[in-house]
Amino acid sequence: MPQKDEQRAGAASIRTAPAVWGNVPPRNPNFTGREDLLRQLHERLLRDKGAALVPQALHGMGGIGKTSLALQYVYERMSEYDVVWWVSAERTAQISLSLAELAPHLGRQQGADASTTVVDVLRSLRTGVPYANWLLVYDNAESPEAIRQFLPSGGPGTVLITSRNPQWAGIARTLEIDVFRREESKLLLSARSAEIGDEDADRLADALGDLPLAIEQAAAWHAETGMPVEEYLQLLDEQRVELLRDTASPQAQHSAIAAWNISLDQLETTAPAAYQLLQICSFYAPEPIPRRLFVRPRGSLSPELDATLQDPIRLGQAFRDIGRYSLARFDHRSSSLVMHRLVRAAVASRMTDDQRATVQRSAHLLLAAMDPNDPNNIVHWERYGMLHPHVAVSDAVRSDESRVRSLVVNVVIYLLRWGDYESGLDLAHTAHESWSQALGEDHPQTLQISRWLGFLLFTMGRYAEAAELNSAVLEAHRRSIGPEAQDTIDALGNVALDHRVRGAFAEALVLSESVHQQYLRLLGPDDPETLRAAHNLGVSLRLVGDFARARDLDQQTWSGYTEIYGQDHIDPLRTWLGYIHDIRELGQYSAALVHLRDTSARADTLLRSDHPMRLSVLRYLAVTLRKAGEPDEALHTAERARTALIRRYGDHNPESMAATLELCTQWRDRGDTEEARTLGTEAWHRYEQTYGRHHPHTLSAAANLAITHRLLGNAPAAQHINELVLKEFTAGLGENHPSTLACRTNLAGDHYVLGDAATALDLDTETLHRSRALFDEDHPFTLACAANLAMGLRALGRVEEADTLHTRTLDRLGHRLGSHHPTVTRVAGRSHRTDCDIDPMPL
């Protein structure tokens, strides 16, 4: 080893590692030369370090040594940083996941949905808390557009990018990496194989175009085989392959791929199993390929592979054979195989069409063998995250194997549960188009991916597309397998979702009832599918205001789920949240709050803070805190919920809109009526854009806004809104729906403020009567109606009657809510009527 390399290695061995060191590949023990580039890179990073963060981008053709240079810099300078984090930047999903993994090291919670966690990580880096001296390396970035959103916008650290794309001037300073100088090529060749003399090294370097990756491969090959240089050069000249475009210059492509072909010929002859493993890996994504992926699937791949995949010793030997020729590198720390894109191109170029089909099938079967077949289980999400890029790049959607298509469906479900809706939608769309053509629109697996595609569209708020697809899937099931089949019944449940979106809650309830009854008949009450149908029925019952029946059903469903999964599983957790909704709407505010605090803590452990369900729990907590009489904590929680939901989903997501409505209520209760009106108007418009003017949720937003108008002195506008809303609620939901009763109460308040106490009294009397029938005498809403009625009686001179009703009501309210509850305080003052906000139930 040259003296400088010895000094460099020795110095590195005594350096202290950073406090945070993540995902950095192993050091290249054969790194040679590049002294000027390393020095220049260090000077640039030091100069541009600081709040006005300017990344450095190393760019150059494939195989030029960009990653090796970045790695060498990291290992030489690691003691100068508190944080060194390596990000594989070829795919945006991997960037997001890698940055999310950094979160706990910065004192941030790592969420099940990476996107929100990434925002927190970038904020920590920008502020320099808890570490101010950090280095991020984005390796193999495709373009500025692909990674711009993942770069810190400033801060005290440094960013290093490697890329084949030279177009980085807009966001980074660029440093072009060229081929080796001839001296560096010869130095590496002689260092790896002492038998190569200066003249032969010069001839080899010239033949290989001084491309670092090709030089290293040739040196490794010669060290392994000892073939005379003359013979090697002759073989190199004879290799002719179709070259990969846009990866390297034509000369370098030809030289590198031709060089690898010589090694591949040798590997194919001496270690056929290792060669076949390389062929399979050429179909996978550029991300590291975990060793655990190489497990023999059901059925045979080839005699050599079958024997190797079932024997860990033989598998390890195959990896060593591959490494001996520098065709790929096995990273022992991550237990994964790393293969350069040019090697992939060289391997792929050697296969005939028939060979490609055979090897691609093997690649797909290996992926399918790793499928846990349980994408709803959080325990398996890490594995599905590993499988996803390889499923996408290997074109698994084109497989004619049923088990491979099942893997594709499960990856789509995982992406939905994880929260990566865009990736899930892209994969589901591709699979749906491919399977519709190859299998037919009525094939069971085409219909299966169609159902999940519909659910993704629904989740993303693309309701019209979801409804059209769900309707087509239902008709296809009825046509192909009949109306009584389980899949048809399941598709009927998706159509019930579309009815809820249209605001046809009663129709949705009929469908949900039908689905549940059919599952009871087909599978019995304890089957998970029956329990899922029961959960959906509970959702429909809440939407029509039948909270008592929903409560009983949800409690029964939750018990069934916990018998199967235990409490710490997403399905029982979802149903338990429904149960908390039920008891809260039945007036058990304190009990609901106790349950919700406990559930929030469990969800935080199970799902982490930015999982979609966890954010919904935060919103539910804000509503429940307000109703339970904890205004300060309620406001803080409402603000957190809205901020997190909008950051995660955007303004038009149902949960974001509901969180906005809740914050309007909180602000209005604290006297910030102008802010409440502005935000409330915005929320109403968003509901109208999303669901239409006549949807119950849009009408609820309008009714809540009417309260704000009255408090700002515009009672006529409030009255006009409430009259229209009440008419639509009565027609669409019925006289006794809780939302109808709330709107009637608010309309009575409008009349009262406008001096029409008699009409207010009539409305309050009717509402109190209906509330007692719907709930009970001591429900907080019933008691609020009674207190409002007492004010109306007093305004009409019926003082004794009013005092009696007020005293009795105040006593019951204090007993039910506690003497310090804001509602009790307001009623005790006798000067303000109680208004009733409407909290839209989840669809």
Image: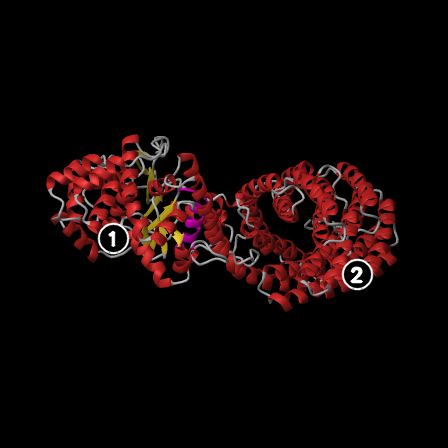
How many residues crowd mark 2 within 10 Å: few (<14), some (14–19), many (20+)?
many
Residue 314: percent from left, percent from top: 35, 61
Give the structural element (helix, strand or loop) at label 1.
helix
Q: Magenta stretch?
A: 90-107
Q: Nearer the viewer, residue 212 or 734?
A: 212
In the figure, 614 relative to 393: above or below?
A: below
Q: Nearer the viewer, residue 742 or 479?
A: 479
Colouring style: secondary structure
Q: Residue furthest bottom?
A: 563
Report which residue position mark 2 lands on: 809
Which quadrant of the view contains residue 350?
A: top left
Is residue 225 one of those drawn in magenta?
Answer: no
Q: Can residue 729 be seen in this view?
A: yes
Which quadrant of the view contains residue 650?
A: top right
Residue 419: percent from left, percent from top: 54, 49
How many residues crowd mark 1 within 10 Å: few (<14), some (14–19), many (20+)?
some
* Sequence-first disc among 1 and 2: 1
Left or right for 164, reference 392: left
Name the chief secondary structure element in magenta: helix
Residue 558: percent from left, percent from top: 67, 64
Is residue 105 one of those drawn in magenta?
Answer: yes
Give the structural element (helix, strand or loop) at label 2.
helix
User: Residue shown at 40%/40% (left/top)?
Assistant: 153
Mark 1 or 2, which is nearer the eye? 1
Report which residue position mark 1 lands on: 79
- What is the total number of numbered labels drawn onto the structure image? 2
User: Label 1, label 2: how many angstroms apart (C-alpha)?
Assistant: 71 Å
Residue type highlighted by circle 1? Ser
Left or right for 464, reference 169: right
Residue 641: percent from left, percent from top: 57, 50
Q: Is residue 35 visible?
A: no
Left or right for 535, reference 27: right
